Amino acid sequence: MYAYKSETTKLLQEFLKNHPEEQENRLKNRALLWDVELNPEEQKAFTKAHIMRGAYAYQSK
């Protein structure tokens, strides 16, 4: 097994061990950015607004 841990990893692990309440904050803050429910109506609007690009965008006409 790969046993190397960077200084940053060690620092974060130690910090979380000494401050267990931060784990709850990490999960709460993750939910703000990543665990988001997508609005189906907005998704449809984004799909409809998509503009098809030409075969080669940098070709002069």
Image (cartoon, rainbow, N blue to C red):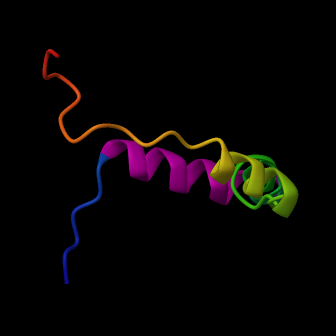
Is 32 placed above or below 39 here?
A: above
Instruction: Give, as a single range, the part of the protein colored magenta.
Output: 7-21
- Horizontal side of 33 relative to 14 (left or right) equals right
Residue 20 in view here: no
- In the rendered image, which quarter contains the C terminus? top left
Residue 34 in sight: yes
* Rendered residue at 22%/72% (across/down): 3
- The x, y position of residue 12, in whole percent, is 52, 48
State whether residue 7 is above or below residue 39. Answer: above
Q: Residue at x 19, y 84 (%)?
A: 1
Which residue is nearer to you in this view: 12 or 38? 38
x, y percent for residue 35? 75, 61
**Residue that appears at 47% across and 45% down:** 11
Q: Is residue 24 above or below residue 12?
A: below
Does the segment drawn in magenta span residue 20?
A: yes
From the image, give the main secondary structure of the stretch colored magenta.
helix
